[in-house]
Amino acid sequence: MFVLFTDFGLEGPYIGQVKAALWQGAPERPVIDLLSDAPPFDPLSGAYLLAAYAEAMPPDSLILGVVDPGVGGPRRALAVEAGRRWFVGPDNGLLAIAARRAGDARVWEIDWTGPGVSASFHGRDVFAPLAAGLARGETPPGRTRPLEAIVGADWPEDLDRIVYIDRYGNAMTGLRAAVLEPGAVLEAGGRTLTRAESFFQVPTGAAFWYENANGLAEVAVNQGRADQALGLDVGAPVRIGTGPISED
């Protein structure tokens, strides 16, 4: 299946146009809207979100990632085969963490130009046709490159900042819960947060952190909005500790 991961939002024609381009090239493949509200213009945050969610996608998925503030500029387009999945998107770091974690990555720098390619909508005019071609078994039309040469290859394995706020106000971090010590506490928004298994373990209105369903450490407030209660937004720093942290 095709898996869409973008910052387009559901408003307007953009998602529909990308889906139409995918259908035109590979009508037998279903299209899944994984995430349409990735943090806009922020491939760094998107990279850690995409890496967490890509692991749950079935083998042979074609993941089309478009968070592309440099569209029309010198940034390159990529096709990456890693972990029995394909990733297609801009060379701005968005694909780097997912490709590195999947292992055995093969990277192509894509040459895709022509009169029908707009300067501002490569999601429709470059990435979607490329993904459809891969679905048909075509070889990527470009040059191979080492994974170490793409943007984001040197980014840390985990990111100690907020990378996404969901509709409930929960704040996902770029930290995998599995790499944190069992007694780790997190500091975010000037508050010290201990770990709970889930919402039922803390009183209503209490702030805490937990391992979310995709393995990320997530800051939440039981029946409340962590973003408002703690003053959090995408990019806010998160500090890791192993005991009580001063709130000064």
Image: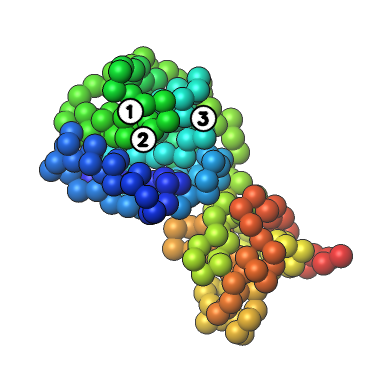
Give the quadrant of residue 247.
bottom right
Q: How many marks?
A: 3
Q: Is residue 53 left or right of residue 202?
A: left
Residue picked out by circle 3:
70
Question: Quick check: marks 3 and 2 in contact, CB under 8 Å?
Answer: no
Residue picked out by circle 1:
126
Q: Earlier in the sequence, mark 1 or mark 3?
A: 3
In depth, the one of 79 and 245 nearer the eye is 79
Residue picked out by circle 2:
123
Alpha carbon separation for disc pair 1 and 3: 14 Å
Q: Is residue 248 left or right of residue 99?
A: right
Q: Is residue 212 left or right of residue 35?
A: right
Residue under the image location 24 percent in, 21 percent down: 139
Q: What residue type is disc 1 on?
A: Val
In the structure shown, which secondary structural element does the residue marked by tag 2 occupy? helix
The picture places residue 77, in percent across and down from the top left corner, at: 41, 25
User: Taking the image as drawn, is residue 48 in sight?
Assistant: no
Give the quadrant of residue 191.
bottom right
| Residue 123 vertical placement versus 163 (above, below) | above
Q: What residue type is disc 3 on?
A: Gly
Residue under the image location 16 percent in, 31 percent down: 136
